[in-house]
């Protein structure tokens, strides 16, 4: 820390992204990226747009808003596209929380929520999940706080039904409820159809996972016009050109290739069922995931040891040190070939350890 760093941030612990190593070629199952390349339509559109990079991007992301709204059955002013969904989540913390309106989220969920709260000086409460990692909707009734729920949750993969989210929305009519649907395309139930019914609902999604565009940094929020207007006030006060030209073009491209996205999600869902069954055969417990990753533990090998042994064999998965999480690992679902390498390396490791 330099002697110039503001006191405001002196105690801030930043978010730790999953490793992106460059030292060797890993089978990378640690950051929930897609194993599939971007849509050819996205690639062609971004490529053409590269020739116009001397010009600022459209600050309204107008064409993308139109295409996205069409895809979702909404109006363009009911959505806001951002630089990854991390940006809209940060905007939501800035716009809808303060000293008097703290934030609330689960004790086990996306690790960025407490960082956003601390960055923006927002008090927050972490609400413990049940012993089996499920979220009890009742724990969120009448909280008097702005609520953030990842659905499906990370790193567990467990999902709440839309009906359960509705109970939480109804029980908090005077507070915003943010539903982070980063993984919804892999078997979750989206709450976007509810945004016209609940003016306190903001749904966020991302192009990073199901649409194979993590490197493009495109995410969005969907909510009633007033919420979106507030978020735009924050956007135009921080970074008006928040989505670059190539990413806007690529996002429009992938939205005109919905069959490709759907087919890829279906493959991930099939590979998830395959990997879950194979791990269970080997004595693992695997939570019932609706995401493009699974959360698994084995009674005979510590989570950290499995992570380290797999890394030494060229397979990267994600381990979390938090006490309740440390027996587990989060494993991204990749291609069938990648899953078979994972299983083969696990067999080698288990053989050595028994
Ligand atoms: C990956 C992820 C995000 C954000 O991803 P972006 O790449 O910033 O769009 C948000 N929430 C959860 C739960 C995630 O796992």
Image (tube, rainbow, N blue to C red):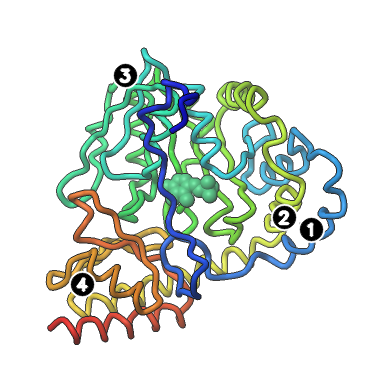
Mark 2 and mark 4 residues within 8 Å of each other at the beta carbon: no
Horizontal side of 349 relative to 354 (left or right) equals right
Which tag, 3 or 2, sits closer to the chain's start?
3
Q: Is residue 199 left or right of residue 170?
A: right
The first of marks 1 and 2 along the sequence is: 1
Q: Which secondary structure lies at badge 2?
A: helix
Q: Classify the position of the C terminus by image quarter.
A: bottom left
Residue at mark 1 to residue at mark 3: CA–CA distance: 45 Å
Q: Are marks 4 and 1 in contact (CB under 8 Å)?
A: no
Categorize mark 2 by other alpha carbons within 10 Å: few (<14), some (14-19), many (20+): many
Q: Which residue is mark 4?
A: 284
Q: Tag 1's secondary structure?
A: helix
Mark 1 or mark 3: name the one nearer the start of the chain: 1
Q: Which mark is residue 45?
A: 1
Q: Nearer the viewer, mark 1 or mark 3?
A: 1
Q: Which residue is mark 3?
A: 144
Q: Do the residues bearing badges 1 and 2 touch, measured as CB atoms within 8 Å?
A: yes
């Amino acid at each position: 820390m330099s002697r110039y760093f503001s006191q405001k941030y002196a105690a801030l612990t930043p978010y730790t992204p999953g490793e992106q190593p460059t030292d060797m070629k890993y089978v990378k199952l640690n950051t929930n990226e897609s194993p599939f390349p971007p849509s050819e339509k996205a690639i062609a559109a971004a490529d053409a747009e590269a020739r116009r990079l001397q010009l600022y991007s459209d600050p309204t992301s107008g064409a993308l808003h139109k295409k996205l709204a069409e895809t979702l059955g909404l109006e363009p002013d009911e959505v806001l596209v951002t630089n990854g969904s991390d940006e809209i989540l940060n905007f939501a913390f800035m716009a809808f929380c303060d000293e008097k309106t703290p934030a609330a989220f689960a004790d086990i969920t996306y690790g960025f929520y407490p960082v956003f709260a601390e960055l923006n000086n927002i008090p927050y409460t972490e609400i413990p999940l049940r012993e089996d990692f499920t979220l009890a909707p009742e724990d969120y009734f009448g909280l008097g706080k702005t609520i953030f729920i990842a659905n499906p949750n990370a790193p567990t993969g467990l999902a709440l039904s839309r009906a359960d989210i509705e109970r939480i929305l109804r029980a908090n009519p005077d507070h915003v409820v943010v539903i982070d649907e980063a993984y919804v395309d892999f078997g979750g139930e989206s709450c976007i159809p509810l945004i016209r019914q609940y003016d306190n609902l903001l749904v966020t999604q991302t192009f990073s996972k199901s649409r194979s565009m993590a490197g493009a940094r495109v995410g969005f929020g969907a909510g009633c016009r007033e919420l979106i207007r507030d978020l735009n006030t924050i956007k135009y006060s921080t970074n008006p050109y928040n989505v670059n030209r190539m990413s806007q073009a690529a996002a429009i491209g992938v939205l005109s290739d919905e069959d490709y996205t759907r087919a890829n999600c279906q493959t991930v869902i099939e590979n998830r069922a395959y990997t879950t069954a194979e791990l269970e055969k080997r004595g693992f417990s695997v939570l019932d995931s609706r995401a493009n990753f699974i959360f698994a533990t084995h009674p005979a090998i510590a989570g950290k040891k499995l992570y380290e042994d797999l890394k030494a064999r060229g397979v990267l998965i994600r381990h979390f040190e938090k006490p309740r999480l440390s027996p587990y690992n989060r494993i991204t679902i990749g291609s069938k070939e990648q899953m078979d390498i994972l299983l083969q390396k696990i067999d080698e490791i288990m053989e050595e350890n028994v």
